[in-house]
Image: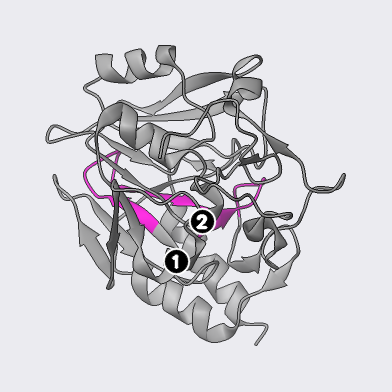
Amino acid sequence: MIISPSAKNICSTCGVRYGTSIIPTICEICADDRQYPGFNGQVWTSYNELATKSTIRFSRLLSTVYDLRITPAFAIAQKAHLVLSSSGNILWDCVPFIDDQTIAFIRSLGGISAIAISHPHYYSLMQDWATAFDCPIYLHASDREWIRDPGGYIELWDGPAKKLWDNISIIHVAGHFPGSTVLHLPDHGRAGCLLTGDSIYVAPSRRHMSFMYSYPNHIPLPKKDIDFIYERVHPLPFDAMYGAFEWMNIAEGARTIFERSISRHLSIY
């Protein structure tokens, strides 16, 4: 199905695009307890409306990692990350806008060989990005019910990890969503790094991390889910962590903060 850029099918609160012919009265992703409908009620926008005011800004975090975000901020206002690797570049998470300038810049860096997304709040315009670079979208199968823009680029995977290339792996951590994941880059940065979306949430102080069912609604996870996150992340070598928002950059010492934060969360149970 060809989707018109004038179709009002992008949720203004979460930025997820619906690729179906029937748009619900309320965004089903925002109606879930982990998110919320807009304060002004449900508002839908179109790609064309976004294009009149939006650009994408890139910032270089490491020699091999860029972050990118929409400016001015829109919807959840998350970052995505572009990972440069000799066997193929990876887009981690996604943003609800793409334009020719962005495509040209990324192609100058070698394009994108795969898209991997941490959880459904960041599905955004994943099909447009995959179409632009003719690459697969890797989503954990546990979150298949939240796909609102289905298409042939999506490849569901299951299990604890999906190995990509150059020692890069998508790690299933669950928690925030049943299929929540992080991207492990053991050979990037000083001693490896994790890209976490908000499967692991870095506090603005950068001295703490949290692990929640819902961040905006402050709904905690049960102990078993935090234990599971620790079980999956503890064995991974990393020293840096980059999350979904501008303040979520820990260039060194992230493992120590992770371990301390896990202990603090578990101490309340």
Q: Are marks 2 and 1 in contact (CB under 8 Å)?
A: yes
| Front residue of this view, candidates 90 and 29 | 29
Residue bearing the label numbered 1: 143
For the question of whether residue 251 can be seen, the reply is no
Instruction: Name the quarter where the N terminus is drawn.
Output: top left
Which image quadrant for residue 77? Answer: top right
The disc labelled 1 sits on which kind of residue?
Asp
The answer to which quarter of the image holds residue 216 is bottom right
Residue 49 showing in the rendered view: yes
Q: Is residue 199 located in the magenta-colored stretch of the structure?
A: yes
Q: Name the residue under label 2.
A: 120
Instruction: Name the residue located 44 percent from the left edge and 72 percent from the top edge.
Output: 229
Neighbour tally class for label 1: few under 14, some 14-19, many 20 plus, Cα within 10 Å: some
- Numbered label attached to residue 35: none
Examine the rendered structure and indicate whether residue 29 appears above or below residue 16: below
Q: Which colour scheme is used?
A: one colour
**Image location (x, y in percent) of residue 232:** 35, 71
Asked if residue 218 is among those painted magenta in the image, a careful observer would answer: no
Residue 265, x across and y down, in percent:
61, 75
User: Relative to the observer, which residue lies in front, 180 or 146?
Assistant: 146
Residue 128 lies in quadrant: top left
Left or right of 257 in this view: 50 = right
Residue numbers of the magenta segment: 182-207
Query: Dot 2 surroundings within 10 Å: few (below 14), some, or many (20 or more)?
Result: many
Residue 74 pos. (x, y %): 67, 32
Residue at position x 18%, y 51% from top? 164
Q: Under tag 1, what secondary structure?
A: helix
Residue 218 vs residue 221: left or right?
right
What type is the residue that disc 2 sits on?
Answer: Pro
- Residue 41 in the image, given as x and y percentages of width and height: 84, 48
Q: In the image, is residue 205 above or below residue 105? A: below
